[in-house]
């Protein structure tokens, strides 16, 4: 289950065929315009479209959208609704589990982007210990002034 969630939530739009992205975006946008509350809604971004495409093969996704049309299912405000609903209906992964995993991935992503203490003080091309020595020398020179 976590593998499926990670595959979907970490999907990158650059790995998909551009034509497929356009077609999926048009289907999602069309559904949102026809069934949503805002007939002037904007199309989904590339990330959400890629996550939707990562759910299952395209024919299965078309079947899902047709089922939703047949049920007259009203979408929520966000296009992430399609991803959450696809996880639930195609893979049996409930919204609560998907929400928790999204939050976990955000925490991991933020931690990966945060510089480590050694990277904060290091000068490009120098070891952290060399940088510390340079800083000590500069401080010593400032104290003499």
Image (cartoon, rainbow, N blue to C red):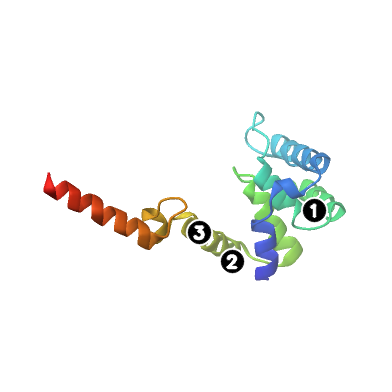
Q: Nearer the viewer, mark 3 or mark 1?
A: 3
Tell me which numbered mark, 3 or 1, is placed earlier along the sequence: 1
Splitting the image into 4 quarters, where does residue 38 fall?
top right
Instruction: Tell me which residue sits at (60%, 44%) in the image.
Output: 78
Instruction: Tell me which residue sits at (47%, 53%) in the image.
Output: 125
Label 1 belongs to which residue? 64
Instruction: Tell me which residue sits at (30%, 54%) in the image.
Output: 134
Tell me which numbered mark, 2 or 1, is placed earlier along the sequence: 1
In this view of the protein, can residue 73 be seen by the observer? no
Q: Position of residue 27 (x, y in %)?
A: 78, 40
Label 2 belongs to which residue? 97
Q: Bin the neighbour count of mark 3 within 10 Å (Cα to Cα): few under 14, some 14-19, many 20 and up.
A: few
In this view of the protein, can residue 61 be seen by the observer? yes
User: What is the CA distance from the residue labelled 3 to the residue labelled 1?
Assistant: 35 Å
User: What is the CA distance from the residue labelled 2 to the residue labelled 1?
Assistant: 20 Å
Which of 51/91 is in front? 51
Label 3 belongs to which residue? 112
Splitting the image into 4 quarters, where does residue 137 fall?
bottom left
């Amino acid at each position: 289950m976590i593998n499926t969630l990670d595959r979907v939530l970490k999907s990158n739009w650059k790995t998909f065929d551009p034509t497929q992205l356009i077609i999926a975006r048009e289907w999602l946008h069309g559904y949102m315009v026809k069934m949503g509350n805002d007939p002037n809604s904007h199309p989904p971004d590339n990330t959400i479209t890629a996550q939707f495409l990562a759910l299952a093969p395209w024919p299965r996704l078309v079947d899902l959208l047709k089922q939703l049309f047949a049920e007259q299912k009203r979408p929520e405000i966000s296009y992430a609704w399609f991803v959450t609903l696809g996880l639930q209906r195609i893979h049996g992964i409930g919204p609560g589990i998907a929400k928790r995993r999204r939050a976990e991935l955000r925490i991991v992503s933020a931690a990966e982007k945060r510089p480590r203490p050694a990277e904060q003080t290091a000068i490009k091309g120098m070891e952290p210990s060399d940088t510390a020595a340079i800083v000590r020398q500069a401080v010593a020179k400032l104290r003499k002034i």
